[in-house]
Image (cartoon, rainbow, N blue to C red):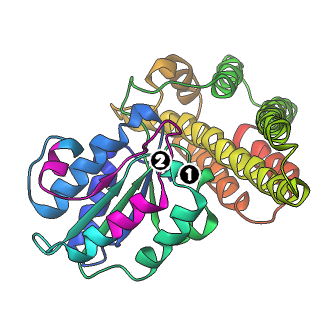
Amino acid sequence: MPYKADHALQLVDRARQSQRLGHAYLITGPKEAKREQFAARLLNLVSGQKHRDLDTWQLTGIPIVTPGSKSRRISIDSMRGLQHAMHMRTAADGYKFGVVVDAERMTTEAQNAFLKTLEEPPPGALLLLLTGKPEELLPTTLSRVIQIELIPEDGARQFNEHELKLLALLEAQSKRSTTSMAGALNLKAAFESVLEELYEGIEEDAEEGLDKEKEHFQKTTDSSAYFKDREKQVEAKIESTYLHQRDALLELLLSWMGDIIRHKVGGERLDLPSHAEATKAIAERTTIEDASRRLRALTQLEKHLHTNVNENLALEVCFIQAFG
């Protein structure tokens, strides 16, 4: 579940106070969520120090790895340097900090070399991996970190074309004075069209990149075996990118329904303040019990879609319950 920075820090602090703080966190979210600023605040919280940003933290001697060279990749040597620094450095206030900015830029070799540190960190280690594209990390890396997904503060959020289309659909739905099963199914069909367009765009971009690789390496000896593996990697990347961006659309649905409930209970902070008029209109003709039931349906959909459930069936059941 995505959180605003202050809420996420409260959860981290709660874990720290109960001695359940993890040793490696993956901080994700759009650029508007200010991942680096959040990382500096997290280090301040855990250490009790007060540094303005990661640059200031780096001046204290903690290793901070960023993409280097023209290719903007993080090499295996950079990650070995971080590992060495964390093992050699004396823990300050009981912690040994390490930060990787734009972690998706780590090469496969760099990620594999880093796995041992993720699996067997030095005493007092706290590693922060920052990325806006977690789907580009290896599954073995993702399985060894605790993810903190951030959403921007009110007014800072920027929506991509698919999110804007979904918001337009919800705005149109808000203008209907009554709900019906037919209306819910129409909304579901429109949402599926957005998902289909999303998938096709991801697939087109990935295949275009692969075609350029093939053109560049077509004269390489034994390139057929290489591209057979690359095709499998591209297929996996298409799927993981789609699932990540689908999750973002589901989060938008949750934010929309959450704002309806916030209107009902007099909440002052909205996730989607630019759409307050529409969500308020729905809130005025919806009971708190009904709104809560609809929110539960969307929450259940999010859980179901992280299993092997049929996507079309899960969407149909949810949209009938949430918008019918």
User: Is residue 58 inside the magenta stretch?
Assistant: yes
Q: Residue at x 91, y 55 (%)?
A: 224
**Which amino acid type is marked by label 2?**
Thr
Q: In the rendered structure, are the residues bearing label 2 and label 1 in contact, judged by CB atoms less than 8 Å apart?
A: yes
- Image disc number at residue 131: 2
Quarter assignment of residue 191: top right
The residue to which callout 1 is attached is 134
Res 287 seen here: no
Q: Residue at x 28, y 41 (%)?
A: 37
Left or right? Give the position of 257 relative to 262: right
Q: Position of residue 9 (x, y in %)?
A: 28, 54
Q: Position of residue 16 (x, y in %)?
A: 24, 70
| Label 2 crowd bin: few (<14), some (14–19), many (20+), radius 10 Å | many
Q: Position of residue 181 (x, y in %)?
A: 84, 37
**Which amino acid type is marked by label 1?**
Pro
Quarter assignment of residue 108: bottom right
